[in-house]
Image (cartoon, helix red, strand yellow):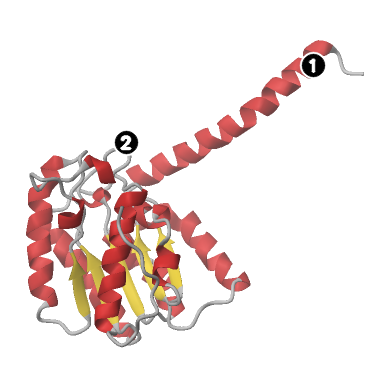
Amino acid sequence: MCPWKTTRTLCAVLLLVPLLHLAVLKSTETMALLDGSPAAWQSEIDAYNAAIVIERLPVDPVVVVGGRLVQLWPGLEAALDPLPVLRRGLGDATVDDIRYHYESLVGVYRPATVVLLPGSSEFQIRDNKSADELFDSIRELAEVDAAHGRTSVFYVFAPLHTPRYPGDQHKIRQVTARLVHWAGTRDGVEVIDPNPLLADRSGGPDPRWFRGNGVHLNDGGFLRLSLLLQHALLHRQPGDTTLAASQPH
């Protein structure tokens, strides 16, 4: 029989294991965020590549790429049903990271539709782009995708105005204007600006649609993104009325 002190110590260690695991995950995530190299996300890329071996891949899917927002987006598959949806979020990755890992995140799935949702990391810790630099990064990603010759439509969500980073709003308005103008000259590229639907009466980001950190959307905010994307897909295929119907709260 184990002595009481040994048993108590063992129980304490077992209780600490989940906390230690969480600390390791947070530390790994922080290191990736501070690492400016696309290789920072290799473990997540390896996980996606491994899943390809055991999963049955859908035909002509809608591939949604971006960072943390894509990983957190609830109800997306239901909103776009019966279209097959693959979410390929990559930590707090930038558009440049996504372009670097394009083949693993997008190309291998031979998508009919690609949806890009940029995150706040474009202007914050991981990167400090100007509006022109972010526009160039998005354009280059779209060109890489077009070169594969599979995607019918490349949708770009404009970057979100967030309560936490009000200083980014001027750059976001600039890059959104450039994206809209560029998309008007390109077949197969469409821009979706979610900011009006997430704004308060003053035109700024409404905290009601964001989590407490002021960066990530809550369920109500994500629902608005789902509705916008659903509407865009129906607009492209007006004869298809099979997408799930829902209304914002």
Looking at the rendered structure, the secondary structure element under dot 1 is helix
Mark 1: amino acid: Thr
Q: Nearer the viewer, mark 1 or mark 2?
A: 2
Q: Is residue 8 above or below residue 43?
A: above
The front one of 78 and 128 is 78
Residue drawn 20% across the image and 59% down it: 194
Q: Is residue 120 left or right of residue 223?
A: left
The reply to whether discs 1 and 2 touch (Cβ–Cβ < 8 Å) is no
Residue drawn 41% across the image and 68% down it: 105
Distance Cα–Cα, label 1 vs label 2: 42 Å
Question: Horizontal and vertical percent for residue 222?
Answer: 33, 55
The front one of 22 and 227 is 227
Question: Horizontal and vertical percent for residue 129?
Answer: 16, 53
Q: Is residue 247 above or below residue 190?
A: above
Residue 6 is labelled as: 1
The front one of 144 and 244 is 244
Q: Residues within 10 Å of mark 2 (few under 14, many from 20)?
A: few
Mark 2: amino acid: Gly
Quadrant of image for the N terminus? top right
Residue 201 at least partly seen: yes
Q: Is residue 188 left or right of residue 223?
A: left
Residue 14 is labelled as: none
Q: Is residue 212 above or below residue 219?
A: above
- Would you name the residue on which mark 2 appears? 212
Q: Quadrant of residue 158?
A: bottom left
The front one of 217 and 244 is 244
Residue 141 at least partly seen: no
Question: Horizontal and vertical percent for residue 37?
Answer: 34, 53
Mark 1 and mark 2 lie on one chain; the one further toward the N terminus is: 1
